[in-house]
Image: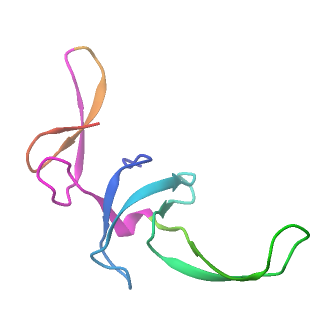
Amino acid sequence: MKLKKKDKVIVLSGREKGKRGEILQIFSEDEGRVLIAKINMVTKHKKPQQNEPGGIQKKEAPMAACKVMLVCPKCDKPTRVKLDKLATGERVRVCRGCSEVIL
């Protein structure tokens, strides 16, 4: 998976199509799911616990990683990512549109 935590992404399909957000958590590669801030909100009914009140709460739900695409910080467009090696031997992600290194 070429996505990392704190990357800015755009949703490609589904009811949240076109919305942008930041990745909060990446689940295992086998699962292929990501948690994005304020995207794919679901309601959760929670019973009251000893110290916590109950009620209906809204929270983010994981969504498939194939439904999101990385947004290049320089050109501000959704982009496919290419992996390149620098002269130092370090592998970095590169935007296919503007050839800018994505950190």
User: Toward the viewer: 43 or 85?
Assistant: 43
Residue furthest to the left: 98
Image spot of residue 15 (x, y percent): 38, 85
Q: Which residues are magenta?
A: 65-87
Residue 45 included in the magenta stretch of the image? no
From the viewer's perspective, is 42 left or right of 21? right
- Residue at image x 80%, y 76%? 53
Q: Classify 11 as above or below 31.
A: below
Residue 51 sits in quarter? bottom right
Q: Position of residue 82 (x, y in %)?
A: 23, 43
Quick check: 10 left or right of 34? left
Of residues 66 and 68, the one nearer the viewer is: 68
Count every numbered label the image shows and give the total: 0
Furthest toward the right, the residue is 50
In the rendered image, the quadrant that contains the C terminus is top left
Let me know if residue 70 is in the magenta part.
Answer: yes
Question: Residue 90, located in which quarter of the rendered image?
Answer: top left
Left/right of residue 87 with respect to residue 40 in the rendered view: left
| 103 vs 95: above or below | above
Location of residue 81 with respect to 63 vertically, above or below? above
Q: Position of residue 24 (x, y in %)?
A: 49, 55
The x and y percentages for residue 12 are 30, 73
Identify the colour scheme used. rainbow
